[in-house]
Image (cartoon, rainbow, N blue to C red):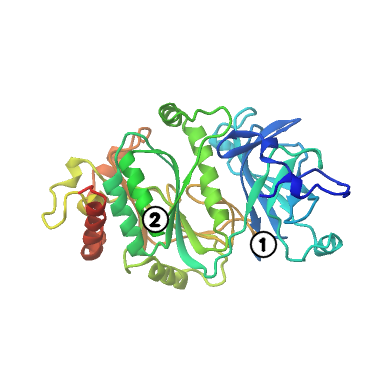
Amino acid sequence: MREKSKISGGKFKHTCAYYPSILDLQFNNNFWQILRSSNGTFFLYGAYHDNRTAVQKPTIRILGMINRIEPKVKTHCLLWYDAARDPLLTPVVEYKYIWNKIWGNYKHGILQPYLMACYLPNPADLIAKKFKIDQIPVSVSLTEKGCEPPTNNLLINNKVPAEKKRFAVCVKGLDFLQVDLSVRLVEWIELLGLLGADKIFLYELEVHPNISRVLKYYQKMGRVDLTPISLPGDQPNLPGLRHLYLKSKIINKRQNELIPYNDCLYRNLNSYDYIALLDTDEVIMPREVSTWNELMERVLAKAPAGQPFASYNFRNVYFWDDAEHSRSLVASIPGHMHMLQHVYRSFNYTKSGQYVKCFHDVQKILLLHNHYPLACSKGKCTSYAVDPQTAHLQHYRSDCQLKKTNCQVEYKQHLVKDTTIWRYNQDLIPRVNAVLRNLGLL
């Protein structure tokens, strides 16, 4: 980032705000900056350049949380260009709500997730300022009164790799303070690699030391991208207290999770064809082919021609962890291979549209929720339901969810043995064992 002294010297008369030094910025904590407006406080997390062909105009998007519902305050983007003394000023044209009011917490004072948008200046304005037509700002400040001194400055994500890859997986903030899931995590990461995940993007609140070792190992290999994250506002960030808060404030937890999900989308607009939002106990499992690439070839061949589907969703089915349903261990499979050992699942799938996970078409999505897209570039989002015989979401659980009173009847009385995952045994077992030995976990 530039220093104020480099752009404010000489006899040049500024027509707008000075570029803020780091001492001018208001930080809520390590990962959030603040705008205090006349009607609400903005906690800002990230900024992104969006020039996808499906969007109306090239746009700078700002992701954050606001302690207001339906914010009315008019705000502006100060767009900071490399070597320019003054920013270019553009209005915020929309506040996109990354939530649905029927899900709860719909009241002032509770932090709400939003994606804000400012259009980039048109070419004539750039030429008048002696900028290149295709020049992209390096950072953005959000203000209420236009050229007032900014209290925030976000670096704009504009990653354009030399080669676009196929599949990325995004994982919400990991909160495993005392639970050691390191061995299961290795099995999960290696299985996703065999399926065709090019990279896994994980966000970290707090994890067990062994989990941290696993993640750093894969990060060093380039297979994992690990981003630390925190909660904004007056929400707790002391690890033990934060864990209790997220466990008891479920709706607040769900709203906070939408920040890493959408950050992962916008950081990778130009890098991948599809992204999947998965938890570490979930796998999108092809049942007729071996890889996600082969799966999508088959799905696209079956889907109605000419339909601009924004996502492809997979029905959820539970694989139970508990001893009653795991029966006995398979002698030829190491006991630490949790998914390979647990092959009894519910005969019944959860209802169509419930607890699904998707492959999201990165070019069509504006807002993401855990289970499906909330907004798309061409208006209403369309999602294609993949036939469970083609592929499904294998969800490994220890027991029924607390509020699912009918779970025992619907999902635990009638079980079937599903060994689809065993097709990966020959490759998966030695890969997992090699990593565990390398890390001293076996």
Q: Quadrant of residue 205?
A: top left
**Residue 257 showing in the rendered view:** yes
**Left or right side of 206 for 87:** right
Q: Residues within 10 Å of mark 1 (few under 14, many from 20)?
A: some
Residue 103, image x, y percentages: 54, 36
Residue 145 horizontal side relative to residue 382, left or right: right
Residue 10, given in percent of the width and then of the height, sits at 85, 49
Residue for point 68% across, 54% down: 138
Mark with earlier residue (2, 1):
1
Q: Quadrant of residue 36?
A: top right
User: The residue tagged with tag 2: helix, strand or loop?
Assistant: helix
Per the model, the C-alpha gap separating discs 2 and 1 is 31 Å
Q: What amino acid is at disc 2?
A: Lys
Mark seen at residue 220: 2
272 relative to 75 in the view: left or right = left
Q: Residue sitting at 65 percent across and 60 percent down?
A: 378
Q: Which residue occupies the foreground of this view, 151 or 298?
A: 151
Rendering quarter of residue 434: bottom left
Tell me the kind of residue under disc 1.
Answer: Asn
What residue would you read off at disc 1?
Answer: 51
SS for tag 1?
loop
* Residue most extreme to the front: 10
As drawn, 418 above or below 15: below
Depth-wise, is mark 2 or mark 1 nearer the camera?
Answer: 2
Please name whichever residue, 303 or 168, is drawn nearer the observer in this view of the structure. 168
From this view, report whether residue 161 is shown above or below residue 342: below
Q: Between 412 and 423, which is closer to the camera in this rendering? A: 423
